[in-house]
């Protein structure tokens, strides 16, 4: 296959010359030609052979749209001229000739329009192949037959005008052009610039009007060609109707057709002879199918518009049944209902289903556009690199919460933290069953980061004060993204440490072992800044001991030593003053651990047990926040 024979189709969905071009391209992408997988589409304009028209060319599309307007005339005129012969040889004849001339021009034009090969999805612009394809298909003979003016040809050959019924039926071949209307509606239904509902509605109206018009004209033709004019459906009402006005007969015909189609049947116009009764039976059978088609389509359009409402009501009913069955408190049930209602109200804003189907690059661009500035303005990520900010934003998930809903519970395991985009949160604690509001946080503030960074149970409950939008990030993703960015990790630790030091006194008191936690964080930061060789050696040794197994640590920066809590007594004992233990960095050896315990508790131990009573023999087996009991046996 030579390059001149077949070329890649429309490249414009892939070119970005200006924002206006992109908008136009997206608007018409539903009707454009797309290349096959693996086809290379360059940035240059597509050049077809000389005198070959691209099927997506805007001028050719306007030409096709103009022909659809002429098709509407043909659909009306063909049955009308069959029923009323005066119109066929009178005022409508020159109009028919002009319309036929336009369609004859389109036949010639079709020999120069490239087509899409169904096997390769490449445009074929070879003149011989285009002509061979058009002539060998049904399109060509039907296009010619529906365009030829048979009456004029007969007059040229015989020299006289013939008004026989044969020409009336031959004119019905023009209805072949209706395929263009079907193709137009098919394209409009996929075009996002037009409402799908109104497009379908117009299609149903078009079908109905054509059916009413055609049935009325055929019914009048039956009466006009009956041997006894008075023994017909219209002859009973209008004497000598053949010699009356054409529009009087057309009005009666359309009136009968509409009354019959709508199954009203007043009885003023009814079938009289056998032929009319047979036609009525077939027409009413056709009406049954047409009515079912219209009702089915309208029902589908209406139900489709209300499907979200049905889904919401069903979900609310399920919540009510669940709450009633499990006897949930009234307040909790109201929170569940409010959250479900908000989920459906904000579905158009979140569009998770739409975003999931988009490529990751587009999803990332959307997230950066919406939330980059919010994340950059939070205290925790001030001063971090743009690379880390981009990674953080693209992994965050947006969510809405209604008023008076708890998004973080006190003492729950920290799995993720939140950044407030809009709204207000109350910071609460529960002391002896009493609720106390400690503070409020607003847009660009962070919630839940204390539990995540310290890896401790969440010290506060966070409750929405009004409708709030948040973006959340999991603990795992945060740790995973910070690890390669050591400098950014230091910045985050520094920001967090300063924030904790500036925290209100009453809030600091609610965080257990805050001084030890802050001290450990300061040590970690200093160790990272000074880049101590011993720290590198510790990490290298730990990786060697684990033989390539990833360190099971949930701390923010996993390169720092593991933190454990030590007690100076047996796990079965509960001495006063040692309920919380001491939080320390795990040293390099068991001997060093004994020395640290001696400094903390003033006595030296010789045995280390876990909380479940198992004895510790290797420090590498310990995990973050394990409790160790060191005592003298």
Image (spheres, rainbow, N blue to C red):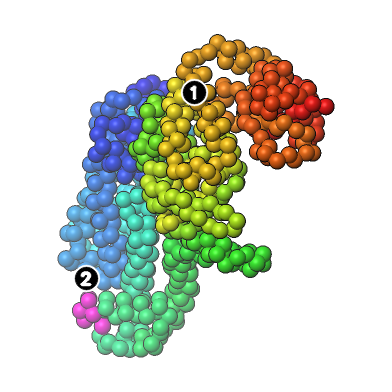
Which labelled disc corresponds to residue 525?
A: 1
Callout 2 secondary element: helix
The answer to whether 200 is drawn above or below residue 275 in the figure is: above
Residue 437: x and y in percent read 47, 54
Mark 2 sits on what residue?
Answer: 86
Any magenta on residue 244?
A: yes
Residue 43: x and y in percent read 31, 25
Q: What crowding class fits label 2: few (fewer than 14 Cα within 10 Å), some (14-19), or many (20 or more)?
A: some
Pick the front one: 268 or 327: 327
- In the rendered image, which quarter is residue 544 located in? top right
Question: Which residue is found at the position 52% from the left and 61% from the top?
Answer: 335
The answer to whether residue 149 of the structure is visible from this angle is no
Question: Which residue is found at the position 57% from the left and 22% from the top?
Answer: 560
Quarter of the image with the N terminus is: top left
Callout 1 secondary element: helix
The answer to whether 434 is drawn above or below residue 249 in the figure is: above
Pick the front one: 552 or 22: 552
Q: Nearer the viewer, mark 2 or mark 1?
A: 1
Question: Which residue is found at the position 41% from the left and 48% from the top?
Answer: 441
How far apart, in angstroms, are the residues tagged by discs 2 and 1? 99 Å
Residue 416: x and y in percent read 53, 41
Q: Work out whether mark 2 precedes mark 1 in sequence or the reverse, and give the earlier one.
A: 2
Tell me where the magenta segment starts and ends, as one range.
241-248
Quarter of the image with the C terminus is: top right
Pick the front one: 413 or 219: 413
The answer to whether residue 399 of the structure is visible from this angle is yes
Q: What crowding class fits label 1: few (fewer than 14 Cα within 10 Å), some (14-19), or many (20 or more)?
A: many
- Left or right: 89 as drawn, with respect to 617: left
């Amino acid at each position: 296959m030579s390059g001149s024979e077949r070329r890649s189709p429309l490249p414009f969905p892939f070119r970005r010359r200006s924002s206006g071009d992109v908008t136009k391209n997206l608007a018409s992408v539903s009707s454009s030609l797309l290349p096959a997988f693996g086809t290379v589409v360059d940035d240059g304009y597509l050049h077809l052979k000389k005198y070959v028209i691209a099927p997506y060319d805007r001028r050719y599309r306007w030409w096709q749209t103009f022909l659809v307007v002429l098709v509407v005339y043909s659909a009306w005129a063909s049955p009308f001229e069959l029923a009323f012969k005066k119109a066929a040889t009178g005022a409508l004849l020159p109009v028919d000739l002009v319309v036929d001339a336009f369609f004859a021009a389109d036949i010639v034009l079709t020999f120069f329009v490239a087509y899409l090969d169904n096997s390769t999805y490449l445009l074929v612009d070879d003149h011989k192949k285009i002509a061979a394809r058009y002539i060998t298909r049904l399109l060509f003979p039907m296009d010619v037959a529906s365009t030829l003016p048979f009456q004029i040809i007969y007059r040229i050959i015989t020299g006289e005008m013939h008004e026989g019924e044969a020409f009336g039926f031959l004119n019905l071949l023009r209805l072949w052009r209706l395929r263009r209307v079907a193709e137009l509606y098919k394209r409009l239904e996929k075009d996002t610039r037009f409402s799908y509902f109104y497009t379908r509605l117009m299609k149903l109206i078009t079908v109905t009007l054509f059916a009413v018009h055609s049935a009325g004209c055929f019914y009048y033709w039956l009466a006009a060609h009956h041997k006894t004019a008075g023994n017909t459906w219209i002859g009973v009402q209008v004497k000598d109707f053949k010699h009356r006005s054409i529009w009087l007969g057309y009005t009666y015909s359309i009136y009968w057709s509409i009354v019959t189609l709508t199954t009203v049947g007043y009885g003023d116009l009814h079938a009289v002879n056998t032929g009319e009764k047979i036609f009525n039976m077939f027409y009413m059978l056709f009406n049954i199918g047409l009515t079912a088609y219209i009702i089915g389509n309208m029902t589908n359009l209406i139900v489709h518009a209300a499907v979200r409402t049905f889904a919401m009501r069903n979900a609310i009913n399920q919540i009510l049944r669940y709450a009633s069955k499990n006897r949930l408190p009234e307040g909790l049930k109201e929170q569940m209902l409010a959250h479900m209602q908000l989920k459906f109200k904000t579905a158009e804003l979140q569009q998770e289903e739409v975003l999931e189907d988009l490529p990751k690059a587009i999803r990332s661009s959307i997230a950066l556009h919406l939330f980059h500035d919010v994340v950059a303005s939070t205290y925790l990520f001030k001063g971090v690199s743009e690379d880390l900010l981009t990674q953080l934003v693209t992994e965050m998930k947006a969510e809405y919460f209604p008023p008076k809903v708890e998004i973080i519970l006190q003492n729950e395991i920290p799995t993720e933290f939140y950044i407030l985009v809009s709204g207000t949160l109350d910071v609460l604690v529960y002391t002896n069953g009493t609720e106390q509001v400690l503070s409020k946080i607003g847009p660009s503030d962070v919630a839940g980061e204390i539990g995540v960074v310290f890896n401790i149970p969440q010290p506060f409950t966070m409750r929405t004060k009004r409708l709030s939008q948040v973006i959340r990030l999991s603990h795992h993703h945060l740790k995973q993204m910070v690890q390669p960015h050591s400098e950014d990790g230091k910045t985050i630790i520094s920001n967090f440490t300063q924030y904790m030091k500036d925290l209100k006194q009453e809030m600091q008191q609610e965080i257990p072992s805050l001084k030890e936690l802050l001290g450990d964080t300061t040590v970690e930061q200093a160790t990272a800044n000074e880049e101590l060789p011993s720290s590198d050696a510790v990490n290298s040794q730990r990786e060697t001991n684990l033989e390539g197994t990833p360190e099971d640590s949930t701390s923010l920066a996993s390169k720092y030593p593991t933190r454990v809590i030590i007690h100076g007594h047996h796990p079965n004992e509960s001495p006063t003053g040692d309920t919380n233990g001491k939080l320390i960095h795990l040293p390099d050896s068991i001997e060093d651990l004994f020395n640290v315990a001696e400094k903390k508790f003033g006595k030296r131990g010789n045995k280390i047990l876990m909380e479940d009573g198992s004895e510790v023999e290797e420090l590498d087996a310990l995990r973050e926040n394990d409790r160790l009991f060191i005592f003298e046996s």
